Image: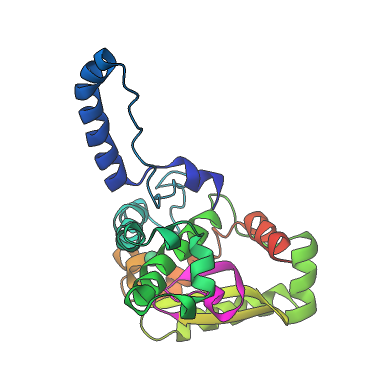
Amino acid sequence: MSAASQTSVNRRAFVQGAAAIAAGVASANWAGQAGLVLAQAPAPLVELPKLPYAYDALEPHIDAKTMMIHHTKHHQAYIDRFAGVLKDHPDLAAKKPEDLLKNLAALPDAVRAIVQNHGGGHVNHTLFWNTMGPGKGGEPKGKLAEAIKSKFTSFANLKEAITTAAMTRFGSGWAWLALGKDGLEVLSTANQDTPLSLGKTPLVGIDVWEHAYYLNYQNRRADYVKAWWNVVDWDAVAKNFQAAS
Ligand SMILES: [Fe+2]
């Protein structure tokens, strides 16, 4: 989880925390007088990561209203459902969400779908925010560029492969550049499924759920995908590649 994601506060947890603090303040005088040490409110199980840029920073490619609703409503909703499961399973809460997604078969039947859909939603969106930025786009450099050229011959071919994966994903899902045992590959997944569950590490992905583009692009997914290339942060993707290599 990025530093940005660790610094933000799950709103629900914040409200609960604030209530606990308020209650704590009310009882602090009594406790202080009695010489007792008060326990601190527990840390939230999952936090909504702060965006590393403003909601309007990706305009005109992705509009501010879409970004705000996508982040504060959709991503938050995935977190709320995921945290609801973790609350009742401290053994799962102790693990990284990515590690749960890497081995869905090991999860109890009762929680597997929620981890897959909502834990996946949280992890996928966190990657999505952190691999975009204002004034980005262009082409990757360094070892990632070399690996792309080696596997796809050219960056243009990679771009075409991801665009095709994004356009042919029926319904909701994602298109990815991932690193698997055979090197770089392009794939798409349905819903909030992640390449992590397929033994691959996602390096960058485009969200092709309608909630990611409908306000500005309506049914024109192709225009949204074309615009997304202008905000891809290849330096961030290169860091993901380096970490996964
Ligand atoms: Fe989304």
Does residue 4 appear to the left or right of 213 in the view shown? right
Residue at (43%, 52%) from the top-left corner?
A: 59
* Ligand 1: image quarter: bottom left
Residue 206: percent from left, percent from top: 49, 69
Q: Residue at x 55, y 76 (%)?
A: 195
Asked whether 215 or 71 is in front, the reply is 71
Q: Does residue 118 appear in this view?
A: yes
Query: Residue most toward the top?
Result: 33
Q: Is residue 20 magenta?
A: no
- Name the spot of residue 5 as percent of width and height, x first: 48, 48
User: Up-down: is 134 above or below 113?
Assistant: above
Q: Position of residue 194 (x, y in %)?
A: 50, 74
Is residue 200 shown in magenta? yes
Figure label count: 0
Residue 183: quadrant of the picture: bottom right
Judge by depth and name the residue closer to the eye, 177 or 43.
Answer: 43
In depth, the one of 194 and 55 nearer the eye is: 194
| Quarter of image, res 54 | top left
Q: Residue at x 55, y 73 (%)?
A: 196
What colouring does the structure picture have? rainbow
Task: Give above or below for 68 relative to 92.
Answer: above
Q: Position of residue 32 (x, y in %)?
A: 28, 16
Which residues are drawn in magenta? 190-208
Residue 242 position (above or below residue 111): above
Q: Is residue 52 visible?
A: no
Q: Nearer the viewer, residue 131 or 43?
A: 43
| Quarter placement of the C terminus | bottom right
